[in-house]
Structure formats: structure tokens, C-alpha cells
């Protein structure tokens, strides 16, 4: 049994986790654990870019306004202002670190800025159509080279170690139990502060743009540790995921529509102007519902996103990765439209935190998609997510640096003396598939009470089966993820059943109207 100790432990290696690590490492011993390799996570797959007020023709007030409109009345205005006001500093930090954003020497900023749905200005700074990869690879090099950062790849957190688990007074986190996937044994990691930066929960759905690592781990662990969750019913479905049998979860960036891409039916008919005056530049929830409506109305497997009328050189310059990937599949986007479908993309809710990333449990922070800061409201504005990772990440780091260390208690080793090897692991794969299909069918883009209740019944049965499995058998990566997915699914459905209206990403046929007063959905765990 291995025991490790750090000043600060970060769970997750996306932009939120990397930001924290780099801001802390000059003064703290930092442990960074990640389920696969350092760069495998949703941040690396982000294509479009980062929203920030950089152009003098733009303004902080307009970015705030666009965010509030997209959030359908549910954004926290103080949070939104704090993040937008700090947007330029965050971009300057990335530029100083050497992130290779796409340049445009004719523009006052020196960079090319694009526009995405819901934005009133061109304010998305990007690195071609692979911004996330450019940012995380740049920061990843700094992480690997830093002597104060210990990187633990192929480790998955199992559960947080809290005062309640140790039988102590108060409500504090002291670290985590984690599975070393290569060595196949559980280690105990102690830390003064623990940060959940583990991303979202897209894999709870059958179709998602997310990588396989997005299994709601941090949300489920935080909930079990005693943290409240907020606004879990708001799951953003990206309108345009590539529809192709040989391409899994490949996103067609929002920026394709921002640069003039048109959504069409198979016969070439354009349909978005019939659904919203902003047409293809409407916020994601509007576009996703419109596509869902047209697919159901016409019995379609997909619709088509067409930018082929633009010059081939323009397409190849602005979207080199999308162009190359589609071409490998026999789709030349300079000559033909791209088949697309909506897919689960972003978890707008999560563990309730303040502007310093602090949760309800002392010593436990949550940053990035795992958290609910109030920025995204009922629908995230495109390209605000990476910005939130950096702003809240830096604020959390400042809070941690200002806090005094505590005396860590003795930590018991993980006890698996009473469990055996599983006899039939097919149970895990079957339950995984059943859960994701139930969520897709019953808790998707359009919801009803009956569908939600059906989903909750299935989730309860699956939860009982999985918890029994967890109690009796040695743990595996798949079992840990499935346990977290089922818990996260339950939180999504319970939150959706509490909302008696349609707002933003939550659309209910039983309650099609939007209530005059916006209120958050907050669930509190029972002791």
C-alpha cells in the first residue's frame, strides 16, 4: 500500500487543473492525478476558442449581456461580471506562456477573432480549430517540467477522505483514495487542500462529444462527501456533432456556423430562420432543439451543415482539422455539406462553489465543468467555459496560497480484505449501456414528467445493483466510473423533475412556458 502526501492535490488535468497547478507550484508541493495521460480530457478537444473582450469595438458590458441572455435569466450577475472583467488578463497569461493563437496582423489585437452563436461581436480568440489542444499542450509542457508538480497518470480517484469518514468533528476533506490502474492497487493520498477539476458528465448519455473520461466523477464524489449540487438539469447538447459510423464523438465547431455555415435538410432546404430570427447564430439550446424538431418531423438520421459555398482556401485555413478529419471519412467539406446531429456536450450545473472555487466541505475546491459557479445559468454561452477554468482556477489558487496548513490526521489504508474478484464483469458493461440509453431516450433535448420518472425508476434499480457489486468485488476503473455515472444521472433527473417550467436547456412538454421568476435548482445531500 502506497501513501503519498502533498500540500495540494488536484484531481483532473484539463485547463482548470493545469491552471491551478501552475499558479500554485512556485510555493506548494502539488500532486496532479489524471485518469489517463495528461492531455486526455475535454479541454484538449475544445475546438472553437476562448471568449474574451480584446477588441476596442467590443465591451465588457456587451459580453456580460450576451452571457446573461444565453443563460436564460439564471446566470449569477456578480459571477459573470467577475469572469468577464478578468478575461483579458487570462488571455495575456496564455500568450505569455506561448500558446500559439491564430494571428491576424491587420487586426488591432494582432490575433484573429471569430464569432460564435449567441455572441454580438467577434471575440473568440482561437488557435485554428484546435484551441484546446494548443492550450493544453503548451501548459502540459510547463507542468511536466516543473519540479514542484508530481504528475500521476493512469490514476483514478475513488472517493474523498473526509472528517466524517474518519469519525472526526467538522466537515473537512483530507485527501483521496485512488486506484493505480497500471499497478492495480489503491493508494492513499493526503493533502491540505483537494481540488476537483475532473470535468463534466457527457458519458452519461449515449451520444456525446465528450471523451471517455467525462463520467461525472467529481460531481459524484463531491455529493457523497456532503457538497450541494446546483442546476444539474441543464445539460447542453451541442447542435453539430459529426454523424458518421466510423467517427466517434467528433465535434463540428460552433465557429463553422460563426463563419457562415448553413444548416439544411437533405433536400437542401435551410430551416433555422423558421425557428429563430438569429438563424444559425442562435444560442446552442435553440439550434439543438430546432435540429431535433426537424429530425423527428421528417424522420431523419441527421441534418447537414453546409459551408461549401465559401472558397476552399478559406475553409482549409480556418478549419484545417475538421477539413482533414472529414476528408479521411470521404467528406470533402469544400464541396459537400457535413452530416451532423446534436450530442450531449456540456454540464452547466455541478458542485455549488463561490468565486474562489470553495465547496461546502472545508479544504475541498471544485473548478471547471465539475463546478456550478453561476456563470452558465440555464445555457452556457459558447467559449465561456475555458475562460471560467482559468479565472476561477487562479482565484482558487490565490485562496489556497493565503490559507494556513492544517495538521492532517492519520489516514487508514483502503480495506479490500472482505471482497473478491468479480465473477461476471458483463454486468458492468450491460449496466453502462442501459444507463446511457435510458438517459438518451428519457432525459434528452425534450423531456416530459413521464419520461423522467421512467428514467429515475431505472436508475434506482441500476444503482442498487452497482452498489452491491461495489461492496462485494475488487474495484476496477469501469466500476468506479459506472458508480459515478449512475449517481450523476440520478442528480440530473431529480433536478429536472423539480423544475416546473421550460428554461434554457431544460425543455419540458408538460411545462412549456417559462416562469417570470428564475430560480436555481439546488440539491442537498442528507447525512
Image: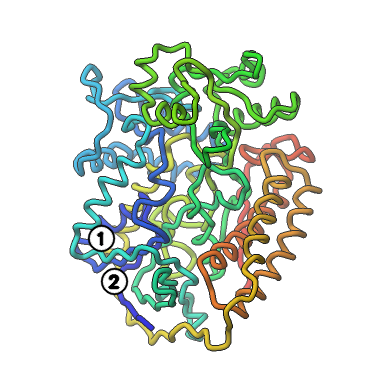
Q: Nearer the viewer, residue 154 or 109?
A: 154
Q: Nearer the viewer, residue 423 or 62?
A: 423
Question: Label 2 belongs to which residue?
Answer: 7
Identify the secondary structure beneath mark 2.
Answer: strand
Q: Which residue: 58% across, 82% down?
A: 420
Query: Which sits earlier in the primary sequence, circle 1 or circle 2?
Result: 2
**Pointers 1 and 2 in contact (C-beta within 8 Å):** yes
Q: Would residue 109 be found to the left or right of residue 240 on screen?
A: left
Residue 306, position in %: x, y?
52, 18
- Residue 378 in sight in this render: no
Q: Would residue 299 be found to the left or right of residue 189 on screen?
A: right
In the displayed structure, would residue 1 be above or below residue 386?
A: below
* Figure quadrant of the C terminus: bottom right
Q: Nearer the viewer, residue 297 or 498?
A: 297
Residue 19, position in %: x, y?
31, 52
Q: Which residue: 63% across, 47% down?
A: 206
Q: Which mark is residue 24?
A: 1
Q: Would residue 217 be found to the left or right of residue 525 on screen?
A: left
Q: Which mark is residue 519?
A: none
Q: Nearer the viewer, residue 506 or 114?
A: 114
Snapshot quadrant of residue 509: top right
In the displayed structure, would residue 155 be above or below residue 289?
A: below
Amino acid at each position: 500500500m502506497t501513501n503519498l502526501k502533498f500540500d495540494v492535490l488536484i484531481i483532473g488535468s484539463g485547463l482548470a487543473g493545469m491552471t491551478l497547478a501552475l499558479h500554485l507550484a512556485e510555493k506548494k508541493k502539488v500532486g496532479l492525478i489524471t485518469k489517463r495521460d495528461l492531455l486526455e480530457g475535454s479541454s484538449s478537444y475544445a475546438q472553437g476558442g476562448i471568449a474574451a473582450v480584446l477588441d476596442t469595438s467590443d465591451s465588457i458590458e456587451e459580453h456580460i449581456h450576451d452571457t446573461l441572455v444565453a443563460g436564460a435569466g439564471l446566470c449569477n450577475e456578480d459571477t459573470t461580471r467577475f469572469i468577464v472583467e478578468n478575461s483579458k488578463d487570462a488571455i495575456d497569461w496564455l500568450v505569455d506562456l506561448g500558446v500559439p493563437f491564430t494571428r491576424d496582423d491587420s487586426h488591432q489585437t494582432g490575433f484573429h477573432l471569430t464569432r460564435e452563436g449567441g455572441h454580438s461581436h467577434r471575440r473568440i480568440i482561437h488557435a485554428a480549430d484546435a484551441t484546446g489542444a494548443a492550450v493544453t499542450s503548451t501548459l502540459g509542457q510547463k507542468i511536466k517540467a516543473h519540479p514542484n508538480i508530481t504528475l500521476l497518470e493512469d490514476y483514478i480517484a475513488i472517493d474523498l477522505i473526509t472528517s466524517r469518514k474518519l469519525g472526526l468533528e467538522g466537515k473537512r476533506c483530507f485527501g483521496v483514495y485512488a486506484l493505480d490502474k497500471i499497478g492495480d492497487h489503491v493508494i492513499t493520498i493526503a493533502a491540505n487542500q483537494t481540488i476537483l477539476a475532473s470535468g463534466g458528465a457527457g458519458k452519461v448519455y449515449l451520444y456525446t462529444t465528450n471523451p471517455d473520461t467525462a463520467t461525472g466523477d467529481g460531481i459524484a464524489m463531491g455529493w457523497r462527501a456532503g457538497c450541494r449540487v446546483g442546476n444539474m438539469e441543464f445539460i447542453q447538447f451541442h447542435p453539430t456533432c459529426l454523424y458518421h459510423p466510423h467517427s466517434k464523438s467528433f465535434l463540428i465547431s460552433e465557429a463553422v456556423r460563426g463563419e457562415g455555415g448553413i444548416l439544411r435538410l437533405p433536400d437542401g432546404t435551410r430551416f433555422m430562420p423558421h425557428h429563430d430570427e438569429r438563424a444559425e447564430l442562435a444560442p446552442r439550446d435553440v439550434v439543438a432543439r430546432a435540429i431535433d424538431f426537424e429530425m423527428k418531423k421528417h424522420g431523419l438520421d441527421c441534418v447537414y451543415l453546409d459551408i461549401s459555398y465559401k472558397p476552399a482556401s478559406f475553409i482549409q485555413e480556418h478549419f484545417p482539422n475538421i477539413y482533414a478529419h472529414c476528408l479521411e471519412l470521404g467528406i470533402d467539406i469544400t464541396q459537400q455539406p457535413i452530416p451532423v446531429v446534436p450530442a450531449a456536450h456540456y454540464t452547466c450545473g455541478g458542485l455549488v462553489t463561490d468565486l474562489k472555487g470553495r465547496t461546502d466541505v472545508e479544504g475541498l475546491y471544485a473548478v471547471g465543468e465539475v463546478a456550478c459557479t453561476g456563470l452558465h445559468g440555464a445555457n452556457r454561452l459558447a467559449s465561456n467555459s475555458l475562460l471560467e477554468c482559468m479565472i476561477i482556477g487562479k482565484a482558487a489558487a490565490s485562496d489556497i496560497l493565503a490559507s494556513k496548513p492544517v495538521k492532517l490526521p492519520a489516514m487508514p489504508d483502503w480495506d479490500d480484505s472482505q471482497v473478491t474478484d468479480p465473477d461476471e464483469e458483463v454486468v458492468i458493461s450491460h449496466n453502462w449501456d442501459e444507463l446511457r440509453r435510458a438517459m438518451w431516450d428519457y432525459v434528452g433535448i425534450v423531456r416530459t414528467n413521464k419520461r423522467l420518472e421512467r428514467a429515475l425508476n431505472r436508475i434506482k434499480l441500476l444503482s442498487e445493483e452497482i452498489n452491491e457489486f461495489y461492496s462485494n468485488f475488487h474495484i476496477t476503473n469501469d466500476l468506479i466510473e459506472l458508480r459515478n455515472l449512475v449517481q450523476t444521472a440520478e442528480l440530473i433527473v431529480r433536478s429536472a423533475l423539480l423544475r416546473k417550467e421550460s428554461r434554457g436547456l431544460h425543455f419540458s412538454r408538460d411545462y412549456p412556458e417559462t416562469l417570470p421568476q428564475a430560480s436555481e435548482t439546488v440539491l442537498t445531500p442528507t447525512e
